[in-house]
Structure formats: structure tokens, C-alpha cells
Image (cartoon, rainbow, N blue to C red):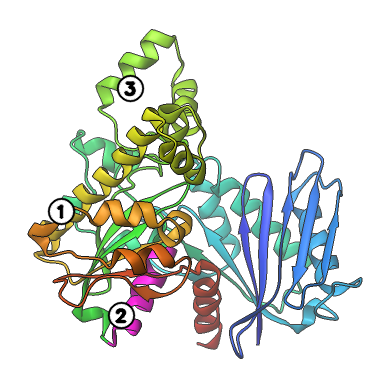
Amino acid sequence: MIILVVNAGSSSLKYQLIDMKDESVLAKGNCDRIGIDGHISHKTSDGRKFEADINFSTHTEAFMELVKALTTGDAKVIDSMDEISAVGHRIVQGADVFDKSVLVTDEVIDKIDELRELAPVHNHAHALALRACKSVIPASVPQVVVFDTAFHQTMPPKAFMFGLPYEDYEKYHVRKYGFHGTSHRFVSKALAEAMGKDVKDLKIVSCHLGNGSSITAVDGGKSVDTSMGFTPLDGVVMGTRTGSVDPSAVTFVADKHGFTPSEMSEYMNKKSGFLGVSGVGSDNRDVQAAALEGNERAILVSDMLTYEIQKYIGSYAAAMNGIDAILFTGGIGENSWEVREAACENMDYFGIKIDKALNKSIRGKLQKISTPDSKIEVWIVPTNEELLIARDTLELISK
């Protein structure tokens, strides 16, 4: 059974074709710069490549080029789209409407589009991609949507409510939603399997660290709290995002700069974080390199990140009444030994001890990095959101 996994952005359409017989990736690629000038990059599992500048003005046109890449030319992997059993889509925001993955219908697409105000960059693009897919893929091929926010729908009200008037929650759905749920769900289950335990018996702090980062308390396989909030701006300091900021600081800075609300949002989402504090860039690798050279602002933002991670670990120990394991995933979590080591230092109260030499030698591989006498196990767990989407899709169409 072959499943196509699609991840649509406002101007991009990333994809993977997965053979569920052995969960191998047959091909993957990206239709980029949709509505601008257009570029497609496509690569097969055996190393064949196709890349071209193609002007696609809409997601439908991009999807047609995706189909061509998969079914024609020297880098094709299937003869026709009839060989695909289903399509799985990643959706960023399902709000409190969707608490699980569902089959795609016109009503589901409309509802996803209606939620665009809560994720203006993503949800409308998702709806466009879903409609594009329906117009290109045979009607007999089922489609499934998997929501980033669904995993966090198990948070209790005391965790997801803000201290704003209750009417804002009732009328405008203002609450914590959390993100990266697909990743947190995948890695928490993968960790339980690696530990030889049932995820229902574990209290896990899942640290998804990348250009966007979120930390989640997973108690018995369910999210009970998470660092991102109403939008992915909240939580720890990130590549270009502020993380948590006193709201009065936001209005103060907006007034000083003369920013409109949308300009202030742009400032906090795209010009802050690692980039704004360090002045070096938004990529953690560049920040770490500058820190090693003695750049004080790079050292500062690195310290801010690891300090905030430690605070979340401590608060989630309180929320779950204990921790069995901490995991690191995402681009930074899987590859930056510096961040992992610093986040686990001076945590003697919790009994956290890592093997520094082992931690330093591991990149992007499933591995326990805590010492045998550590009271809390510490792991690196590579994430694979596309595979989880494919698994959800397979489960739903099998039913």
C-alpha cells in the first residue's frame, strides 16, 4: 500500500511517497515559491533527481507538477496515481473542532478554511492544497487530514485557559492550542518502545527543538501541557520568534516603534529570537559557532534557550508529579550536543545525569544519553511526522 503525504505551506507543497509495506520513502520533494515564480525539487530513494524552475501560480498547478514528477521522466517511481492508496495531509490548526485525524470531506475542508484566522499563514494554504488534491487525484482515492493541534486537545482547562475574560474564549476561541503535536505524539510513542514500556505508564517531557520549538508534558501518552500557546509564538526563544513575553512589553515596544498590530506580529515572529538577540542569525548552528568564538550576544541567547528548557522541565515535573524520561527531538534537539548538555546541567535536584562523551558523539540517532545512575532517563529520539501521518491515514482507510 502506497500513501502520499502532503505538507502544504502558503507558498510551498512538500511531499513524501511512502510504501507502507515496510514504511520506506520511495520519493520526496517540494514545490516551492507557489504564486511567485515556482521551483520543484524531487528525489527518489535510489538517488535519482529532478529539479526545475516551473511557474505554478496556484496550489493546483503545483500539485499537477508533483504528479508529473512521481509518474513521468527519469525520476518517476510509479506509473500512475492509481497506484496510490490514499493521501495524508498535515494541518497546522484544528482548534478545538478536531481532536483526531479524520477523512476529508468538503465540509471538513470548509471548516479548516474557516479556522484560517487562528493560523493565517497555514490553514488557508492547507484548504487550497486539499481542493487542489481533490481536483487532481482520482475520486476513489481517500484523503485524510492529521492536525498538529489534535494531540494537545487532552490538556485540561486549567492548562489551556488564559486569564482573559471568559467571553473571549467563548466568542473568539482564545486559548492555548499547542503545536508540533504530530511530532510529540510520534516521539513519545517511539521512546516508550525504545524503553520497552507502555507509553501509558510513563511521564515524559518531550523537547521538540528547531527553528520553532515546543516542549510538552506527556503523561500516560497524553499531552497535559505544552509551551506553545494560542499561536506558535509562545514558549521558549526560537529562531526568529520571541517566545514568551510580558504583554505589556509588546504594547510598549509597539508604541515606541509606531507599529500596527500586524507589524508588531511580524517583528515578534520574524525579526526576534536567536536573530534579534544574537545579531548573528536565526540558525542555531551559526549561533553556537559564534558563541564558541566568544560572541557575548550569541552566548546570551544560547543561555536563554537552555535556561527556559530547564524551567519547563521543572514546571512539568510539578504538573505530572514526576518525570520518567526527557527526550530531545527536532533539528536542534537531535543534532546539537551543546544544547542538550547545557539543558541537563545543574539539574542535580532531579537526579538528571548525562554521559557527556556519548552525548557529544550522537547526532540524529535514537540513543539513550543518560548515565546508568540517572534517576530520569534522557534520550535523543528522531522525529518523523510524515510517517505518523501515513500511519494515521492507513489506520483510517483500513477502518
Q: Residues within 10 Å of mark 1 (few under 14, many from 20)?
A: some
Q: Position of residue 377 (x, y in %)?
A: 23, 72
Cα–Cα gap, marks 2 and 1: 21 Å
Q: Which mark is residue 207?
A: none
Q: Position of residue 54 (x, y in %)?
A: 87, 49
In magenta, the rendered stretch is: 183-196
Read off the residue under disc 3.
250
| Number of residue marks | 3
On the image, which quarter does residue 225 sit in? bottom left
Residue 50 against residue 143 in the figure, above or below: above
Q: Which mark is residue 192?
A: 2
Cα–Cα gap, marks 3 and 2: 40 Å
Image side of residue 365 versus residue 359, left or right: right
Find out whether residue 190 is within the magenta segment.
Answer: yes
Looking at the rendered image, the disc whose residue lies closer to the viewer, 3 or 2, is 2
Q: Main secondary structure of the magenta part?
A: helix
Residue type beneath disc 2: Ala
On the image, which quarter does residue 329 sit in? bottom left
On the image, which quarter does residue 207 sit in? bottom left
Image side of residue 331 versus residue 41, left or right: left
Secondary element under disc 3, as helix, strand or loop, is helix
Residue at 80% x, 46% y is 38
Cα–Cα gap, marks 1 and 3: 26 Å
Sooner in the amino-acid sequence: mark 1 or mark 3: 3
Residue type beneath disc 3: Val
